Image (cartoon, helix red, strand yellow):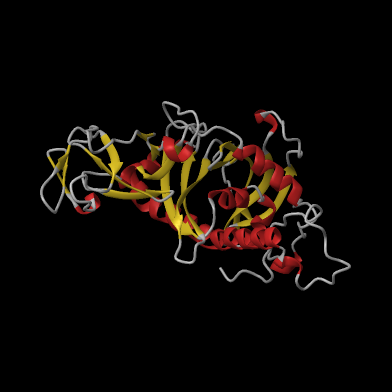
């Protein structure tokens, strides 16, 4: 292990990076996305961080279904419809006492157990994130627990960030299946990015071969930390980046996408929840837990900065796909040059100018 993990980075103008558009093959991205979407999910959806749900009501929406979640006095999680079974009050505005959720309108109490007029929803805390299982929405064969990627052991520090965008969950996952945009679109965080290998377009590719392998340097001002990372998708609404070589080997960044509801203009809305789970074999990292209260806000800030930009990317990608589907992308193309519907590829959007972040 290197005593000093950082490297001094040269001052390279953004525009003089090696272009990656030739390597970012839309067919490869689309094929990887289709394989991901065909994997089982067990009908589980991420609703927030484990620390988000306390003895106060927590509101969550999945595909238009409004839920309320809370913890009982014994720490057990409960979830179910946010609509009070009496007159429809929003139970998310209620109060939890002695483990029961009390409606603020007329005092009806929910224990968290299913009753004749209110059905509890399966809920799972994996130690970092909280999931709910919605079988009518998912429509798949349910599983007892979410399909989780492998996570590093102790010691570790985790931070969770969440944002909302006008796109579908698959647009968020597709964004992460385009690692080629990293150094161009996020030059404040990444540099010297090279995709070492990408999966073929084979629809029946074995799961163990379905990964993107990327060499990238994480940027901290003029200092950089080079690593090799793999990108995989264990289920339709999850994309995992794992460091497999270099500083922080074993650390993971999990990107989870859940549908919310359609916006006022009819466009779909989704929530991205990103869990950064940092690990290191360095002896000093074991002591980092003592000051994780200072470290976690910086981890969240970095995740928010990336997703502020990547949600714009995903929203633009969704818009491009709609244009491809309805033919408006061809309105400015001479008729002789316009591709047919069958020949028209789906293109991943690229920024037209240098990011300002």
Report the side of 168 relative to 113 (left or right). right
Looking at the rendered image, the quarter that the C terminus falls into is: bottom right
Q: Nearer the viewer, residue 271 or 149?
A: 271
Q: Residue 234 appears at what percent x and percent y?
A: 57, 35
Instruction: Evaluate whether residue 186 shows in this view.
Output: no
Q: Residue 185 appears at what percent x and percent y?
A: 63, 62
Looking at the rendered image, the quarter that the N terminus falls into is: top right
Please name the residue shown 44% across and 58% down the image: 301
Number of numbered discs visible in the structure rendering: 0
Residue 190, relative to residue 99: is it above or below?
Answer: below
Q: Residue 248 appears at what percent x and percent y?
A: 54, 40
* Most distant residue in the right direction: 336
Residue 118, relative to residue 295: is it above or below?
Answer: above
Please name the residue shown 76% across and 35% down the image: 202
Please name the residue shown 47% across and 38% down the image: 138
Q: Residue 337 appears at what percent x and percent y?
A: 87, 66
Q: Quadrant of residue 125?
A: top left
Report the side of 62 relative to 267 (left or right). left
């Amino acid at each position: 292990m290197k005593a000093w993990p950082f490297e001094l980075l040269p001052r390279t103008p953004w525009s003089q990076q090696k272009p990656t558009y030739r390597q970012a093959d839309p067919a490869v991205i689309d094929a990887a996305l289709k394989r991901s979407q065909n994997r089982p999910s067990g009908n589980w959806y991420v609703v927030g961080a484990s620390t988000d749900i306390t003895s106060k009501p927590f509101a969550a929406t999945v595909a238009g279904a409004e839920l309320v979640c809370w913890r009982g006095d014994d720490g057990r999680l409960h979830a179910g419809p946010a609509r009070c079974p009496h007159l429809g009050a929003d139970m998310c505005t209620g109060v939890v006492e002695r483990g029961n959720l009390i409606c603020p309108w007329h005092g009806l109490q929910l224990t968290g157990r299913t009753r004749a007029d209110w059905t509890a929803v399966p809920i799972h805390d994996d130690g970092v994130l909280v999931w709910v299982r919605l079988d009518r929405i998912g429509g798949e064969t349910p599983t007892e627990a979410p399909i989780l990627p492998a996570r590093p052991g102790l010691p570790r520090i985790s931070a969770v960030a969440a944002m909302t965008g006008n796109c579908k969950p698959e647009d968020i996952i597709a964004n992460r299946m385009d690692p080629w945009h990293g150094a161009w679109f996020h030059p404040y965080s990444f540099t010297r990015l090279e995709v070492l290998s990408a999966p073929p377009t084979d629809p029946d590719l074995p799961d163990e071969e379905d990964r993107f392998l990327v060499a990238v340097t994480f940027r901290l001002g003029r200092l950089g930390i080079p690593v090799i990372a793999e990108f995989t998708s264990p289920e339709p609404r999850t994309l995992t980046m794992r460091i497999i070589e270099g500083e922080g080997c074993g650390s993971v960044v999990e990107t989870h996408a859940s549908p919310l509801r359609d916006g006022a203009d009819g466009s779909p809305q989704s929530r991205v929840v990103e869990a950064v789970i940092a690990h290191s074999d360095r002896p000093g990292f074991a002591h980092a837990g003592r000051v994780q209260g200072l470290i976690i806000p910086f981890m969240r800030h970095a995740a928010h900065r990336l997703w502020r930009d990547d949600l714009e990317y995903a929203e633009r990608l969704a818009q491009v796909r709609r244009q491809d589907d309805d033919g408006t992308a061809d309105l400015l193309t001479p008729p002789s040059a316009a591709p047919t519907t069958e020949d028209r590829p789906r293109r991943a959007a690229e920024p037209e100018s240098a990011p300002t972040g």
